[in-house]
Image (cartoon, rainbow, N blue to C red):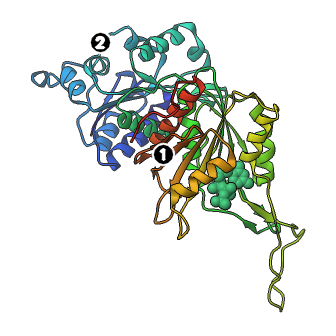
Amino acid sequence: MRVVVGVGGGIAAYKSCSLIRSFTENGHHVRVIPTESALEFVGRATFEALSGNPVHTGVFTDVPEVPHVRLGQEADLVVVAPATADLLSRIAAGRADDLLTATLLTARCPVLLAPAMHTEMWEHPATVANVATLRSRGVTVVEPASGRLTGRDTGSGRLPEPAEIHALAMLLSERDDALPQDLTGRKIVVTAGGTREPLDPVRFLGNRSSGKQGYALARVAAQRGADVTLIAGYTSELADPAAVEVIHVKTAHNMHDAVRKYAPEADTVIMAAAVADFRPTTIAASKIKKGAHEPDSIQLVRNDDILAGLVDARRNGEIADSTVIVGFAAETGDENGDVLTYARTKLRRKGCDLLVVNAVGDGKAFEVDHNDGWLLGADGSESALGDGSKALLASRVLDAVVSVLTSAPSPLSDHG
Ligand code: CTP
């Protein structure tokens, strides 16, 4: 794929180096187009070495090649990170006063802009209007992260981590379309990762969940405008997604309490976490020693089923009737039934509105970046989610959630 990486003149320009690297390492052909002021932060030589291509800022270099038209026309994806307030304003106004803005006017491929600026600039009505204009034209403008800005201040306006920008950019190219803002005003709770049930101060019963699918759901929902709370168990050290409130929990019991705290406010609850079904009956106060004898067997007691409990709570009126509840099922199938047979039974047993089904085993689903599966609806609908990145699957699950939320006749779109 031919990727143009535009770089605006802000301190976060240094993060664009990792982003460029992630594109080249994944085999893409990268052309970097910084603004003149971006070169105040990162040198031209760095961009040339990382991309393996010449780097220019103006339209009067290599004139016979007409680069200000050709680079945009030939691009399969344009990503601008960081996009400063000034750059957003110039792009929204349709200016073409340097190579980057000229390229953006000629590009017809998906375009992703990742803003980074101080909170006051991000919240200024001029910037808000520019972002709205750009989104209305089909440009994806990423919600910035909150956290430490240049200097001592903190707030919204931080550039998301390069890995996150990369994942969102690849999602755009997989969808071949902008990310819609169709979850604006919706509150979504997502659980992710695995719970750990302690045996003693150093040991636990856990599982292989990496949390990647749940994090992708939270990330994409936030970028589609939702107000997202992510209740995260243990993951493979995933960074908090931008613009998402993250609550870290340890045990199934902790996760249960957090879900029940946030669910009453939510329009949708997505249970992507791998919750331990059982916990040790007792937790030893000090480390269990091996001693001279064979070990005692571990007595287990059942944990509450958070998902089934939510469905009961909805039935009892403790949470709103309109709350959409989504479950996950990781199945292997066996001699008594295949993956989908087990999943259909699970959907009926749990009583949720949608069930995302993953076939697991043989390097599928766990710890990897790709996923595939099916989506089953309580109305009997079934569709294949198709193979793709976890971000793409997240986006397809969210398409179905949007359909249920807006009560379209069929909750599932056909992604077969
Ligand atoms: N789940 C839950 N609380 C539990 C266990 C599971 O909320 N104590 C949720 C998971 O987050 C997931 C769904 O239930 O959304 C299905 O999880 P799974 O482990 O596949 O279901 P189980 O009911 O444990 O079924 P199985 O007998 O196949 O283990």
Residue ID at (65%, 62%) = 207
Residue type at mark 2? Asp
Q: Quadrant of the C terminus?
A: top left
- Residue at the bottom extreme of this rendering: 292
**SS under mark 2:** loop
Residue type at mark 1? Lys
- Total of numbered circles in the picture? 2
Q: Is residue 385 left or right of residue 193?
A: left
- Callout 1: 10 Å neighbours few (<14), some, many (20+)? many
Relative to 119, say whether 274 is above or below: below
Q: Is residue 185 left or right of residue 134?
A: right
Residue ID at (58%, 10%) = 124
> Which residue is labeled 1 in the image?
390
Q: Quadrant of the N terminus?
A: top left
- Residue at the left extreme of this rendering: 64
Q: Measure the alpha-carbon separation of dots 2 and 1.
A: 38 Å
- Residue at the right extreme of this rendering: 285
> Which residue is labeled 2 in the image?
97
